[in-house]
Amino acid sequence: MSSKRVLIVDDEEGIRSLLADLFEGLGYRVQLEENGKRGLKAALAEDYDLVILDLSLPGFDGIELLRALKEPKPDLPVIIITGYASMGSAMQALKLGAYDYITKPFDLNEVEMVAARAVERRRLIDENRYLKNELRLRYGFDNVIGLSQEVQKAYVLAAKVADSSASVLILGETGTGKEYLARAIHYQSPRADGPFVKVSCAALPESLLESELFGHEKGSFTGAIARRIGRFEMADGGTLFLDEIGDTTPATQIKLLRVLQEKQFERLGGSETLSVDVRIIAATNRDLKQAIADKVFREDLYYRLNVVTISLPPLRERIEDIPELVEHFIRKYTSDTGKNIDGISPDGMAMLQRYRWPGNIRELENCIERAVILCNGRTILPQHLLFGDGTSPSSAISPAAELKTLREVEKAHVKRVLEYCEFNQSRAASILGIDRKTLRSKIRDYGLGTEIAGSGPDHGAQTNR
């Protein structure tokens, strides 16, 4: 690992020499400059971890250098050296973005401590920026897995709404990827550098949920031994994800409605009105329109949340996406475990595509994670697969089916996929993991052409025109 670099700009040779000895002893590579113009040129030409800058430079002084440096390199920590007579200029330097100041005559131990804090702060800023970039990449809309039309429509709409501050309501069964979509909207939005805060509304009773959302003051209820900051305050400048919003009580819904309308609230037990700038993304697996009809969900809150609605289909309605999802999860868990697994057998894939997946993508991911752990070869086989209830998909195959020839099993599977796709050959070929030419060959070989002809025109041909 390369050593850290420090730029020291001071017109006094004795101070330059003293500081150079200190930082070289600490393992830094040191660059020395004696005036402001040369110091600015050096700072702009190279990457430094720290700048030590004397304010009282002749000609182009430290304030001018700092002002010129902070625009192109705002995160570069600068420590000011000043005399007591120049404290006003030191305060000005702090306002311009200097990290801290030390006064002459200075203690070298103090310089070392301030420098260590400044470099650590820079490291944390760089690390935070790296993590933010990684999150943007991870939750990019181009990472969406899914060929199905409904999934593509959902993410196209999400990409459009990401740039706005509009409230978003995400509908879908448990495990369909609602939180992933919410994070994608946040990390592709102008609020990406702000916090993404999640609250599971179904996990807490009403009293605790209100405290979680809005915070509370010390002594506001039994057990409130200190002030607590709520999730709305935590999410200020960012996004608040209200998961399972359909499980909130009418009393909580009233308070949520006020925050959405006025951007203001009070902590429990408090009188101070707090203002926040928060984007709301809510999600639910419930039918909110039915909940409104049943008088358990407020219609006015529904319309506040429902500026843009995005629906995610269950996995059983997008079986053409299962091969790509399985490949993704195999890559993920082989990387985690260090195993060398190439993929899944055709009969294993067929079993996954026959299953109804009540737990949706989350259940599929768990299934593949277990399979990777259980698999000792290079291919995941049916015996490695377990459903969410602990049963094996291979147990669903009857003895008679096991005694069929491979040709009979393949013919039945090709026919089933064609029927599922309403004989759209392009879609069927995608599900089967083969190209359309190979599918046509199998249709001829298995004598399935008559059934296709009876179904109407070649939907695949129409689709690809």
Image (tube, grey):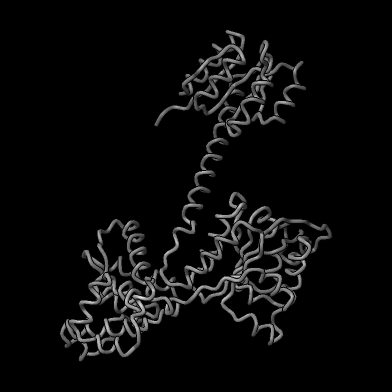
Residue 327: x and y, percent? 33, 65
Q: Is residue 132 left or right of residue 53?
A: left
In the displayed structure, would residue 308 be above or below residue 404?
A: above
Q: Is residue 64 left or right of residue 435?
A: right
Residue 252: x and y, percent? 72, 72
Q: Image quadrant for the N terminus?
A: top left
Return the residue found at the far front: 465
Q: Is residue 294 visible?
A: yes
Compare residues 155 and 36 and report the one nearer the observer.
155
In the displayed structure, would residue 323 be above or below residue 227?
A: below
Compare residues 324 and 376 and report the one nearer the observer.
324
Q: Image quadrant for the C terminus?
A: bottom left
Name the residue rendered at 77%, 56% in the picture: 275
Residue 187: x and y, percent? 55, 55
Q: Is residue 320 left or right of residue 242?
A: left
Name the residue rendered at 58%, 31% in the picture: 73
In the displayed structure, would residue 328 be above or below residue 49?
A: below
- Residue 295's image quarter? bottom right
In the displayed structure, would residue 82 be above or below residue 295?
A: above
Residue 230: x and y, percent? 69, 60
Name the residue rendered at 40%, 82% in the picture: 356
Q: Is residue 25 left or right of residue 286?
A: left
- Residue 50's image quarter? top right
Name the residue rendered at 62%, 16% in the picture: 36
Q: Is residue 219 visible?
A: no
User: How many discs mark residues in the rendered view?
Assistant: 0
